[in-house]
């Protein structure tokens, strides 16, 4: 069985069929979606071209539209309750690229309703391709950046706007692809969700040394999807057929659906350098099928399973060599830690049998459920952040931390993992009234919800007050986990997932 037996592929014959049958009206509509009004501050003959899109829309069309923003409100905390700040990381990354590799170009495909950002972007050296219109939902905006792969004479790196500060490692990966002699590099990952979510190419992290007619390919691909001519399932012959995640235009994930079905098979022929992070234990059966296919398509393809940097570097060049830190537990600055006991869940939870570390005993204790805890914390705590900590966790002998990652500064909530809840008829009806996706929130479905009763949760105090105010107005069956998942689907909250183990704790 081959990759092309399991996953659908847009073939050259499909593109020819589109050329013969697509109407003039369709092509006009496509130009409204992908047309460029003007190019500003372009650079001639750059050594590398980094491309990203910048637009502000909800991830799902069913979640409605956002209010118009201007130069002031785009970074406003109230507005960011429904979206993430992509502007500041983009500007930071562009400035870093201009300083480190001045001969490279950083191109931003900018939504027309954000034209007020042109000067900000040009001032840090960006090329700006101002689009004729805006994005409908997450797409076509997320796909605009793929236009950079057309007619280019230099390597192209595609990134997400908030990934921009990490642009230099991505250029290093591109240079590695040049040394290996392949056409592209990529980072595969699992998209997640109830449908088959393997992604051979992460849209926020890939680069190409070869040009592709992406404008024509995107136009044909969208047309075939909207006319029901693209299979949207992966098919393991004799075993199962399952829906592929992210195939609904113009919702979140459609850009990577295009990369899976259109770009990956073409990139494989030119050779792929595949980077797999050291901390991903398994990508499953489709990753195996992927590697078999791309090495068959081009034997020059290589797989780099890059290691844990702690073991990859010798002692002589470790920046922490000789460091003697005695503090066993480090806590995020400006964060208050509260110890709230959870209910015991089964005899397997060995966390109830050990003597706790003295550092945890010093934190204030709280007796009560999550809802009352949010009420009290929002009223009585003055710090910008608070941590809801299970005091029955076991701090490892090597020490640990509580939410030190700087990326969490852009989040409203950081939680440790998910669990699955079955949707009742009452929750399904509530979800329908709140215009949530019925395919996800339908009665009997298993819904992946954040684990707010998990080992530890980081809350932004200002957000917790807004969240609690709405939580107490809900009917009893709408618990905090359900409401937070709904807000996540509606784009009303910025979240991140972590684990206690990553922070140096033993959960069991």
Image: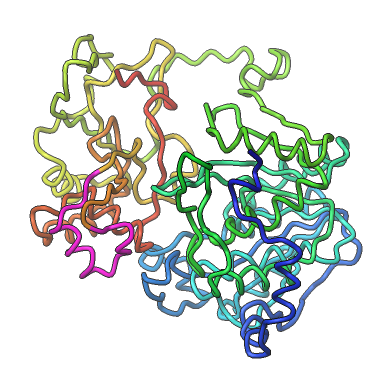
User: Relative to residue 101, is residue 61 depicted above or below?
Assistant: below
Magenta segment, which residues?
421-442
Let me know if residue 381 appears in the view.
yes
Q: Position of residue 122 (x, y in %)?
A: 72, 70
Name the outermost residue toward the front.
Answer: 238
Quarter of the figure with residue 432 = bottom left
Q: Which residue appears farthest toward the bottom when viewing the image?
A: 25
| Foreground residue among 36 and 223 | 223
Residue 226 lies in magenta, yes or no?
A: no
Q: Along the horizontal axis of the image, is 391 left or right of 160? A: left
Question: Picture coordinates of residue 168 (x, y %)?
Answer: 73, 44
* Residue 428 counted in the magenta span: yes
Quarter of the image for the N terminus: give it.
top right
- For this rendering, which residue is in front, 407 or 430? 430
Q: Nearer the viewer, residue 197 or 293?
A: 293
Q: Residue at x 70, y 75 (%)?
A: 18
Q: For the point 46% across and 53% down, which residue is it?
A: 243
Residue sitting at 35 percent across and 66 percent down? 78
């Amino acid at each position: 069985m081959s990759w092309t037996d399991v996953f659908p592929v847009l073939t050259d014959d499909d593109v020819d069929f589109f050329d013969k049958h697509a109407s003039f009206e369709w092509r006009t509509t496509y130009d409204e979606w992908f047309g460029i009004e003007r190019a500003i501050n372009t650079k001639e003959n750059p050594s590398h071209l980094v491309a990203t899109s910048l637009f502000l829309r909800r991830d799902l069309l069913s979640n409605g539209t956002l209010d118009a923003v201007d130069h002031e409100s785009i970074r406003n905390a109230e507005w960011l309750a429904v979206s993430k700040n992509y502007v500041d990381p983009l500007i930071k990354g562009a400035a870093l690229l201009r300083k480190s590799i001045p001969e490279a170009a950083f191109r931003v495909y900018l939504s027309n309703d954000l034209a007020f950002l042109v000067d900000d972007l040009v001032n840090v050296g960006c090329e700006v391709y101002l689009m004729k219109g805006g994005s409908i939902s997450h797409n076509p905006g997320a796909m605009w950046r793929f236009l950079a792969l057309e007619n280019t004479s230099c390597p192209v790196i595609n990134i997400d706007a908030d990934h921009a500060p990490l642009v230099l490692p991505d250029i290093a990966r591109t240079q590695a692809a040049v040394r290996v002699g392949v056409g592209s590099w990529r980072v595969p990952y699992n998209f997640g969700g109830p449908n088959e979510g393997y992604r051979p190419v992460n849209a926020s992290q890939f680069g190409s040394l070869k040009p592709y007619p992406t404008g024509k390919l995107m136009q044909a691909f969208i047309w075939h999807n909207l006319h029901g001519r693209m299979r949207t399932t992966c098919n393991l012959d004799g075993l199962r057929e399952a829906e592929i995640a992210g195939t609904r235009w113009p919702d979140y994930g459609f850009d990577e659906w295009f990369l899976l079905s259109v770009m990956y098979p073409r990139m494989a022929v030119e050779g792929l350098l595949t980077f797999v992070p050291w901390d991903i234990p398994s990508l499953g059966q489709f990753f195996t099928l992927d590697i078999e296919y791309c090495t068959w398509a081009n034997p020059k393809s290589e797989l780099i399973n890059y290691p844990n940097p702690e073991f990859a570097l010798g002692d002589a060049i470790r920046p922490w060599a000789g460091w003697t830190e005695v503090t066993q537990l480090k806590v995020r600055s400006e964060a208050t830690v509260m110890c709230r006991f959870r209910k015991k869940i089964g005899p397997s939870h060995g966390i109830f049998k050990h003597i706790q570390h003295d550092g945890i005993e010093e934190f204030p204790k709280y007796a009560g459920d999550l809802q009352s805890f949010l009420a009290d914390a929002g009223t009585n705590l003055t710090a910008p952040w608070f941590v809801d900590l299970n005091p029955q966790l076991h701090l490892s002998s090597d020490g640990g931390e509580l939410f030190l990652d700087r990326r969490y500064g852009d989040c409203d909530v950081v939680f440790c993992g998910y669990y699955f809840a079955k949707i009742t008829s009452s929750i399904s009806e509530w979800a329908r009234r709140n215009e949530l996706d019925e395919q996800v929130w339908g009665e009997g479905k298993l819904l992946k919800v954040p684990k707010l009763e998990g080992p530890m949760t980081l809350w932004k105090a200002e957000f917790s007050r807004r969240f609690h105010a709405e939580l107490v107005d809900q009917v009893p069956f709408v618990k905090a986990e359900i409401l937070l998942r709904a807000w996540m689907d509606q784009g009303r909250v910025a979240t991140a997932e972590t684990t206690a183990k990553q922070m140096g704790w033993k959960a069991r």
